Image (cartoon, helix red, strand yellow):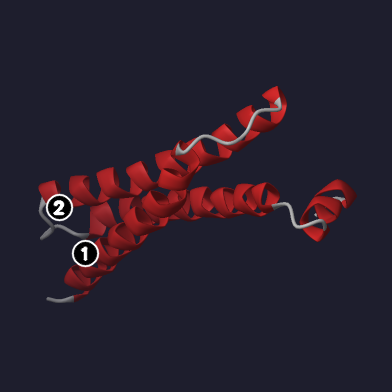
Amino acid sequence: MTEIEEELVGAGDGEALLYDYFKHLTSLCIVSLGGVLALVPYGKSLSPKAVILVLIVLAAAGLLSFSGAGEIVRARFKRKPLNNNVNFCRIGAPVLLSIGVGMFVYLFTRTLLP
């Protein structure tokens, strides 16, 4: 972290922590999407609909987390309080990510079975 980020976190600024949280969630969503896409050539027995559904869930989680981070930046830039949308993103993004990762693990185990 930079000195400014350390000062904000040390002062108890929840927005800085929430911003980092959204950044990490966005990274996890991108990595998970890459994992699903890398699995596609090896999963000949996988249903295309199942793969598309996993991609949609993980992409929605990434979109929510990226939107939450963007909302924090917008509020800080305009010096306004945070919207209630950030709270929705804070709850919705990890829920969708966990559902998507669970679906991904299921598809991955299906590719391992003969």
Q: In this view, which residue lies farthest toward the top?
A: 78
Viewed as shown, does residue 60 lie left or right of 103? right
Which class describes the residues within 10 Å of circle 2: few (<14), some (14-19), or many (20+)?
A: few
Q: Which residue is mark 2?
A: 50
Quadrant into which the C terminus falls: bottom left
The residue under label 1 is which amino acid type? Leu
Say which of 98 and 101 sits in front: 98
Give the label on residue 107, or none. Answer: 1
Viewed as shown, does residue 94 lie left or right of 66? left
Say which of 21 and 51 sits in front: 21
Count of labels in the image: 2
**Image x and y of residue 45, in percent:** 10, 60
Which residue is painted at 56% across and 33% down in the image?
70
Give the secondary structure at mark 1. helix
- In the displayed structure, would residue 9 be above or below residue 77? below
Proximity of marks 2 and 1: CB atoms separated by less than 8 Å: yes
Quadrant into which the N terminus falls: bottom right
